Image (cartoon, rainbow, N blue to C red):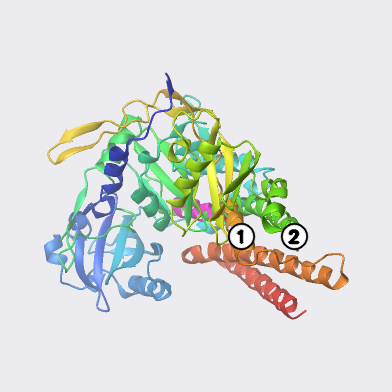
Amino acid sequence: MDHVTPRPQPGADADCAREPIHLSGAIQPHGYLISCSMPDWTVRHASANVAELLDLSPDDVIGHSLREHVADEVLQPLLEVLDLMEPGAPPQRAAIGNIGAMAHLCDFVVHVAGKLVHIELEPRTVKPQGQTPTVVAQRMIARVSGSADMRGFHQRTAEEIRQLTGYDRVMIYRFRHDDAGEVIAEARADDMEPFLGLRYPASDIPAQARALYVRNRIRVIPDVAYAPVPIVPDRDADGAPLDLSQHILRSVSPVHIEYLKNMGIGASMSISIVDNGRLWGLIACHHRTPRLVPPSIRAAAEMFSLFVSMRVSAAEQEVAGRQDDRARDARERLALRLSGADGASALAAAMPILADMLPAEGIALRSDGRWTTHGRTPSIEGLAHALEWARTQGVDRLPAVEHATSWALPLANDGLAGVLAVPFGRRDDWLLFFRVEQVEDVVWAGDPHKPMVPTDDGVRIAPRKSFASWRETVRGHATPWTDAERGAAERLRWLLQERPWQPLPDESDAGNVSDMRLFRRRHVIAEQKSRLDQLGALLDGMGHLEDEETARIGARIAELEAELRALMHGSAVG
């Protein structure tokens, strides 16, 4: 169906965002939960299905030591992992061992939350055989590393994960600036309808769910038809509901389960792609029937995803770096142009340089109560309206939007949509950067408008029942202002306000050439150090899966870090 620019539903989105998905009070039935206080391993909480392992009800287990059911040689590796864990660290696979009188073989996954150690157990039929998760992930990394560009890299990533896990469909799902998601790569069974290029509204994965994906990078639902297993007791010692934010077995929101069922999905797995602490996207896996991927395969997939996150971060930094370089060059030219010149007139004459610094179709300068414009800008009345809007936005962050409804005059019809405002000087001077409207045809996976349905407690979001392509034409929006561009605008404000017309070093002077080169050299080193830090974080995330190969890589990283530190020290003194 074809539609034109549906407006967002604030009430519906807020309803999604308020759902306390981390307080479900239950787990999925493919595993077990035992929560203990230390140092004596006293059981404080247990899932109701723990009787399957111990032949004892939760009430008979709570208050007793876990040592009654698990040998010390199994608990010792858990202690070693816990000793190395930072507060708030994600769950880690710590051991494979036996539990209970029947010696059930289980994977032990641990994390610390509040005052308790939480142990999540998944049954195993046999001890793991063959390649370790580390080796599997390394071979996957080697196969995708030769991709010529990021589009090819994402496609190879989807194919590798599908080959590893056997899911019917694997998608690379990227979050946009407005938190809507888009499928940018896909590997699927031949008889499945393609989802490539489809967009999903932000409310499909609301804010609190995105936050949990950053904290817990892999989530699995082996069977969407499962019956939740309650936790006994379901409240902590203070009477508050148990916070299950980091539990890998946490029972899933009923709304999400209904959503998956409406898609015809029987099982799913999601792996986070994180860029500098921000959820960039997901590796989303779907299967039409129930499917439980073994913990060792999930561990390899999670390790591989850490490399994917690092590669994505490097690509994002490269794009931002090019923007920074262009903005820095323009800023240097602007500073030279303004040096020793009359401020307002020189700045007005330098507007083409400003357009190089912050790509925009139009720029307006307001100084001493007068407007000077360059390129495509609103009428004088429209400029005054935009300025009044900017003044109401506060000073903590530069006002910047990409939709005309925020700032433009009603029925202005000038084709402009985006604005970024830079205040400077002591006389209410402003620079306004304008971007034109970008009309976009979007194909949604179903109608993005979410209906509300009545419940015993009022109303709630009803997951979409149809995912047939639903087209819309989006108007009134411009190309978004990136973080790099916002940063460039902040530095422009600093140049104009804090050090108004101070020149940069003249590169015609030999001494100043050295200063400029030193500055740029330090900048390059800082960028490389940032990337190295990310690789170090990658290895930290692999700590629970270490083997000899990982240890050798870690040693090499340590050598590279030492070399970079020496280089940075030399730059500082040379």
* Mark 1 or 2: the one toward you: 2
Relative to residue 568, is residue 4 depicted above or below?
above
- Bin the neighbour count of mark 2 within 10 Å (Cα to Cα): few under 14, some 14-19, many 20 and up: few
Amino acid marked by disc 1: Arg
Percent coordinates x, y for residue 366 in the rendering: 58, 49
Q: CA distance from mark 1 to mark 2?
A: 20 Å
Question: What residue is at 47 percent from the left and 58 percent from the top?
Answer: 395
Percent coordinates x, y for residue 473 in the rendering: 48, 25
Q: Which residue is mark 2?
A: 341
Please tell me whether the stretch drawn in magenta is mainly helix, strand or loop. helix
Q: What secondary structure is found at the residue carrying circle 2?
A: loop
Percent coordinates x, y for residue 206 in the rendering: 35, 45
User: If you read the primary sequence from the N terminus, does the residue marked by circle 1 or circle 2 appear first?
Assistant: 2
Magenta residue check for 304: yes
Q: Nearer the viewer, residue 401 or 268?
A: 401
Magenta residue check for 42: no
Q: Which residue is mark 1?
A: 491
Relative to residue 492, is residue 432 depicted above or below?
above
- Bin the neighbour count of mark 1 within 10 Å (Cα to Cα): few under 14, some 14-19, many 20 and up: some
Amino acid marked by disc 2: Ala
Q: What secondary structure is found at the residue carrying circle 1?
A: helix
Residue 503 as seen in the image, left or right of residue 295 = right
Residue 204 as seen in the image, left or right of residue 193 = left
Q: Tell me which segment is drawn in magenta.
A: 297-305
Asked which quadrant contains residue 310, the reply is: bottom right
Residue 295 as seen in the image, left or right of residue 134 = left
Quadrant of image for the C terminus: bottom right
Question: What residue is at 48 percent from the left and 54 percent from the top?
Answer: 278
Percent coordinates x, y for residue 34 in the rendering: 25, 63
